Image: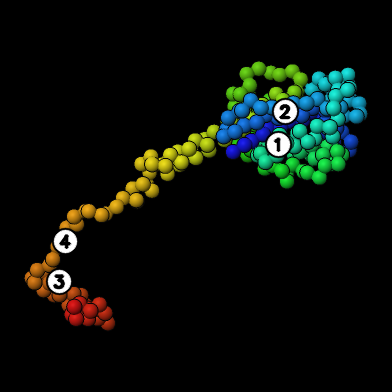
Amino acid sequence: MRHVAVDVETTGLDAAGGDRVISVGCVELMKRQLTGRTFHRLVNPERSIPEASSRVHGITNEQVFGQSRFSDLAGEFLDFVRGAELLGHNLEFDRSFLDEELRRAGREERLEQLCGLTCTLKMARARYPNQRNNLDALSFRLGVASESRGYHDALEDARLTADVWLQMTRKQAELKMDADTSDGGGGGASEAQALSRQGLALARFEPSGDDLERHREMLEMIDGKSEQGAAWLKDFKEA
C-alpha cells in the first residue's frame, strides 16, 4: 500500500480567514518503506508573512518572493498524493489549508476525494492520553528524534510524521505478517484442517451378541426408571 506523509507551513492559522500556504513537504512510503521520493516546494503566498509566523518556520518574505504560486504547482502536488493514504500530524489543519489553496486555484479536487486520511495526532492522543502529543514530543517519546529542532520545516515534519506512524503501527504490521505467514504454509491451523483422510486405515469394531444383549438390558433399565418411557428404545428394539 502507498502512503504519503504531508506537512505545510503557513502565514498563520486560519485558512478560511485568508492565511496561505508558504511551504509543502511530502514523503512517499510503499509497503511501509520510505521510497526516497519527495515533494518539497516553497510557495509564494501572494501576501506578507507575519513576523510571528516567521519565528516558527524561519521562512521570510524575501525567500518566497518570486517562488511559484500554489496554483502553478497544484497539478504536480495532486499527482504526487493522488490515490495514497495521506498521513499528517493534525491532518485536519494541513488538509484545510491545502483544500483552500485548491479552491483558490480553481481546482475541483479535494483531498478526501483523492486520498485516504490518517491523522497521527489522533492516533497519539488515543494511545497516550493526558500526555503532550505534538510532533516534537511524540518523536522523542518514540525514539525517532534525538535532539531538539530549530525552525519547523515542512519536509522534515513530513518525515517525522512518517516515522512516528511507522512506530505506532509497528505491532499491528507484525501481527499481520504473522497471520500472512500462517495462512501461506507456515504450519497454521488452516493447514492442519486441510489434511486428507484418503488412504487411512480406520479401525472398525463390531459388537458381539452378548454386548448387544447387555446394552439392551441397560436401556430397558433406564426405560423402567423413566415416567414416560424412553422414546429411543423403540428404535433400538426394531433395529
Q: Which residue is mark 2?
A: 39
Which residue appears at 62% of the width and 36% of the height? 2
Q: Which residue is mark 4?
A: 204
* Helix, strand or loop at mark 2: strand
Question: Residues at badges 1 and 4 in contact (C-beta under 8 Å)?
Answer: no
Residue 119 shows in this picture: no
* Helix, strand or loop at mark 4: loop
For this rendering, which residue is in front, 38 or 89? Answer: 38
Disc 4 versus disc 2: nearer the observer = 2
Q: Between disc 1 and disc 2, whose residue precedes? A: 2
Q: Which residue is mark 1?
A: 81
Between the C-alphas of marks 4 and 2, the distance is 73 Å
Amino acid under disc 1: Val
Question: Residues at badges 1 and 2 in contact (C-beta under 8 Å)?
Answer: yes
Amino acid under disc 3: His
For this rendering, which residue is in front, 228 or 4? Answer: 4
Which residue appears at 87% of the width and 33% of the height? 19
Quadrant of the snapshot with the N terminus: top right
Density class for disc 2 (Cα within 10 Å; few <14, some 14-19, many ≥20) is some
* Helix, strand or loop at mark 3: helix
Which residue appears at 8% of the width and 72% of the height? 209
Density class for disc 1 (Cα within 10 Å; few <14, some 14-19, many ≥20) is many
